Amino acid sequence: MLIYIAGSGAMGCRFGYQLSKTNHEVILLDNWADHIKAVNEQGLRVTGDIEETVQIPMMLPSQATRQADLIILFTKAMQLTTMLSDIQSLIGSDTKVLCLLNGLGHQEVISQYVPLKNILMGVTVWTAGLPEPGHVNLKGVGTVNLQSIDPAEKEAGQAVAQVLNEAGLNATYDEDVVPSIWRKACVNGSMNSTCALVDCTIGQFFASQEGKDLVKAIIHEFVIVAKAEGVVLNEDEMVQYVMDTSIKAAHHYPSMHQDLVQNKRLTEIDYLNGAVNQMGQKHGIDTPVCRTITQLIHAKESLFQNK
Ligand code: NAD
């Protein structure tokens, strides 16, 4: 099987590295020149739980020529449309396209480029970091849940899960993956955005009653909009899960803090709280907290964009 990783930053390199250990052919696609140069000249350096340097081909999407059997999308959410447009020639009539990005609304975007029968949606709790070009840092273990959007393609979806399992990626074919995608978006939308705005760790944010109350209000908006979209999230269980996670991850700065505060990069807020606000409007549901959080994150992004 020929597998392209479309967007080979932190997560793309994790999946590409693990898949390169199987019998499948893996090609990393990215458009970051320094990263491509480092990987092609020195190999992909892996640190963390494993210390190894591996040779995996990496190129610009425009340099790839063969149509893929499987494409795993791993851009940031706001980069997805451009990537899909850039890889059009690599998508054949039987190419399966798996989306493991965080956030909501990606299926609608992907369906403009890929027939529904070939789309697989999923969610992963693996993590990865990219401290410098050509260097991925891998710690901890995770899972992948995925599903073919077209029920008639269940077997093909199970085959993709099998390929990921050959790489030790702990994949499960999920009969109903959409609630898991919403659940992760809700966790990110309540913990990441708030800590990025207040510039603090998860533990620091949850130390105040005001912080906890704000998180509960965000979760409530996710739950009522999910319900309008036909997705059931148990609000009490969701609140409990987020509160428990805030204790376990108390010293952690969430990824949106790393993006916005530490690295001054744009965030995926429009696909988290922003998406809930947009979908809420469609259903006539007001989501003032998610809307305000989205506006504040964009205001903070504009501080470095306007420089
Ligand atoms: P990243 O920024 O490290 O990687 C994205 C890569 O895509 C970059 O290297 C970028 O150069 C490349 N890219 C973007 N547009 C491109 C284009 N048009 N052509 C070629 N290359 C392009 O991001 P990441 O941390 O790997 O996250 C990817 C997704 O996975 C996000 O949705 C994120 O929320 C999610 N996620 C991340 C983690 C994590 O631990 N990093 C964990 C779970 C889920």
Image (spheres, helix red, strand yellow):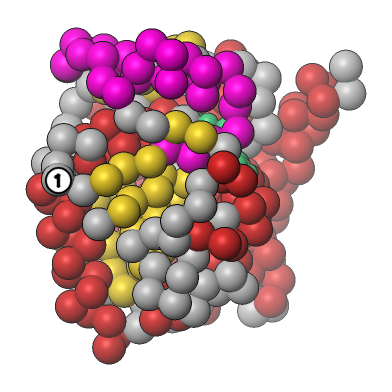
Q: Is residue 32 magenta?
A: yes
Viewer-proximal residue, 60 or 228? 60
Q: Can you say whether 248 is above or below 244 in the image?
A: above
Residue picked out by circle 1: 23
Q: In this view, does 3 lie to the left or right of 295?
A: left
The residue sitting at 61% across, 73% down in the picture is 112
Viewer-proximal residue, 213 or 169? 169
Q: Is residue 198 left or right of residue 163?
A: right
Q: Which residue lies furthest to the right in this view?
A: 306
Q: Is residue 124 magenta?
A: no
Q: Can residue 121 be seen in this view?
A: no
Quadrant in the picture for the N terminus: bottom left
Task: Specify the segment rendered in magenta.
Answer: 28-55
Disc 1 is placed on an element classified as: loop
Q: Can residue 82 be seen in this view?
A: yes
The residue sitting at 33% across, 29% down in the picture is 56
Q: Which residue lies furthest to the bottom in this view?
A: 152
Quadrant in the rendering for residue 63: top right
Quadrant in the picture for the C terminus: top right
Q: Can you say whether 94 is above or below 40 in the image?
A: below
